[in-house]
Amino acid sequence: MSQGKSILCVGNTVIDFVTISQSYPKEDTDRRCLDGFWQRGGNASNVCTVLRALGSKVDFFGMLSKSVAFRALIEDLRKREIGTNHCPETEKDPPFSSIILAQDSGTRTIIHCNKNYPEPTFEDFSKIDLSQYGWVHFEARNPKEVSKMIQSIREHNKKTSQKITISLDFETRYDQNLELCQPCDIVVFSKELAAQKGWESARETVEGLAADISGNGEKPVIICPWGSQGAVCLDATGDFHNIAAYKPEKIVDTLGAGDTFMAGLIYASFVDQRCLTDAMDFANWVAGHKISDYGYDHITKIIETSSRKLPTNL
Ligand code: FRU
């Protein structure tokens, strides 16, 4: 396995304050937690973390901050060798999330505070030499600027035989971000957003999204991870597949499980050149392992110790 070109992940990096509680707290009570920690979070930022844990070359592109609070995030990016060249900087404090992990139910509850943090512009993005990347992954946000970024990759692809694959993580603001889907190669849609749309199953979700994506003929591959039920997709020819989940013995930390799935999918598709359904199976496997322990560092261990680097059970 060799990785020629690098991967670029575009989106947010935030501070996650994680509280581990026996159960989800009752409102207006005063209680002690079991433990807690903070870590660098944010969807694209987590995808970078997991891609590095899997051994990929990866860069992050998003708004960095000069604030004291952000220094720890920069240090963590450096320590993990996640490239940040070309990231714009602001003086503003970074976004943060307050997260409760409830041990009895295995849930993670996120309250995110964005504080109108500035977003990178297409002008910032246009300074990047795209020829160093083989895959660019976007968070669905900031559609005005991100659609221009995606379009510039499509233009780049017209001029080269070494095409960049474009993926999109679609988790929020359906109506605003829908336009970002059509020009991408792969869209991963979240179960939570499906619930907001009133879609009750993974199949209804991928078919509902496919019907809403306009455009003449060309549609992206649409994937929807559905927790313990596994992940489904509509492939490039519109065929439906359902790939089973891997359940760990104990669910410890589900924070970032979706981002881990995304990173596993990119790694298996791009670095290991697997077909779509094999890549989804690998993504399920890494996500299943991620939730068996806190944070992301233990992901490195499965790759180092597993005799079965990629799934064989399809
Ligand atoms: C997990 C996550 C957290 C972050 C939140 C942002 O998917 O990226 O790390 O706090 O979502 O919405």
Image: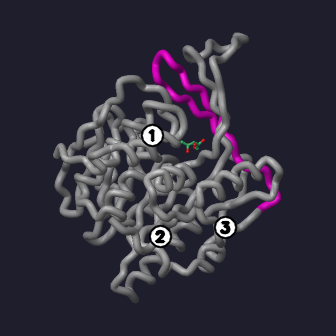
Label 1's element?
helix
Whether residue 290 is in magenta: the answer is: no
Q: Which of the 4 quarters of the picture holds residue 167?
A: bottom left
| Amino acid at circle 2 | Ser
Q: Is residue 252 left or right of residue 28?
A: left
Q: Is residue 68 left or right of residue 193?
A: right
Q: Residue at x 48, y 15 (%)?
A: 104
Report which residue position mark 1 lands on: 257
Report which residue position mark 3 lands on: 87
- Label 1 lies in ligand 1 vicinity (Cβ under 8 Å): yes
| Amino acid at circle 3 | Cys
Q: Which of the 4 quarters of the picture holds residue 92?
A: bottom right
**Residue 197 visible in this rendered orientation of the protein:** yes
Residue 266, image x and y in percent? 38, 58
Q: Mark 2 or mark 1, which is nearer to you? A: 2
Report which residue position mark 2 lands on: 6
Q: What's the image's color scheme? A: one colour
| Amino acid at circle 1 | Ala
Residue 197, image x and y in percent? 41, 41
Which comes sooner in the sequence, label 2 or label 3?
2
Q: Mark 2 or mark 3, which is nearer to you? A: 2
Magenta region:
90-113
Q: Residue at x 29, y 72 (%)?
A: 216
Q: Residues within 10 Å of mark 3 (few under 14, many from 20)?
A: some
